[in-house]
Amino acid sequence: MRILFNTLIFTMGLGFLISSCDKIDTVAQHPKGTTPDLGVNSVTLAPTVADSNNKVLILTWTDPKYATDSNHIKFIVEIDSAGRNFSKATTKIVRKSDTTSFTGRDLNAILLNYGYTLGKPVKLDVRVKSSYENNNEIYNSNVVTLSVTPYADPAKLVTEKTTVTGTLATGGQHSNTFTWSPAFQSYSGTVTYVLEYDSAGKNFVAPQQIPNYGGASVYSASLTQSDMNNTAINSGIPMDSKTGKVEYRVKATTAGGAVAYSNVVNVTI
């Protein structure tokens, strides 16, 4: 009788355990995302100085359809020289959007940082990499190849005075200051500046440089009366109370060898 009772208790307990296991919820399985499809507004771009602050490249891509909202998704735009498999890519992180853009100056800086020659079109590869914020589930989009031409992005030169005079006795006193804006803006390398001059109307066929003024990341030059007088004499202006005009410009050179010349200013000496 006791054996029968124990068997009944064991059977009831086993039935309860089995019924409890049946009540465990199945873990939800979320579908994986999909590869984004990248599109561009144009594959041939030749921006100019006038396009420096304008959007010249616009990228858009499809939703990768991750199992979460956009607050947890990250996109990385990668741009590199064509055929390099993005081994030296310039990157831009985008969140909460399926589009981004680059100005003419943005693209120009990328090309200059790679050392490309001004005025010659080069090929760039572009793609978008999507993932969760923790970099899980990465998908690379299709690759779009662009033809982009780098351009000269010169400094803007301003002169303090348009007419100066001087004497031998006051030659060491201040005469004129030239100031200029940075050239090749957004470029990450060093830009070196030199102040050049020539007599007016010669179109700088044989420009001369003012020694000891300029240099890397220098944006002004303060000249004495003697300095200005020397530029006049070297430009061929007769001495002994004669006057003439001298033209000045700034030559900017990147570490990669790209050169841009500023606007020209005239000073009567």
Image (cartoon, rainbow, N blue to C red):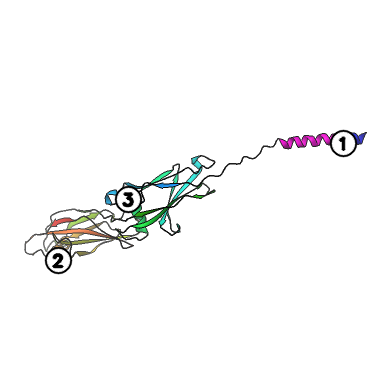
Label 3 with label 1: CB-CB less than 8 Å: no
Q: Secondary structure at mark 1?
A: helix
Q: Is residue 255 above or below residue 22?
A: below
Q: Which residue is mark 3?
A: 104
Q: Bounds of the magenta span?
A: 7-26
Q: Main secondary structure of the magenta part?
A: helix
Q: Give, as a three-letter code, the residue at label 3.
A: Gly
**The N terminus, quarter of image:** top right
Please tell me how crowded label 3 is: few (under 14), some (14-19), or many (20+) other residues with Cα within 10 Å. Answer: many
Secondary structure, mark 2, is helix
State the CA–CA distance, disc 1 to disc 2.
119 Å
Please give the label number shown on residue 234.
2
Instruction: Estimate how packed mark 1 is, as few (under 14), some (14 to 19) or many (20 or more) residues with alpha carbons within 10 Å.
Output: few
Q: Give percent across and percent down for residue 247.
A: 16, 58
Question: Quick one: label 2, few (<14), some, or many (20+) residues within 10 Å?
Answer: some
Residue 54 horizontal/vertical position (percent): 31, 46
Residue placed at 13% from the left, 62% from the top? 232
Q: Which callout, 3 or 2, points to the residue nearer the camera?
A: 3
The disc, 1 or 2, on the residue closer to the chain's N-terminal end is: 1
What is the C-alpha distance between the residues marked 3 and 1? 85 Å
- Residue at image position (49%, 41%) is 71
Label 2 amino acid? Asn
- Residue 220, label in figure: none
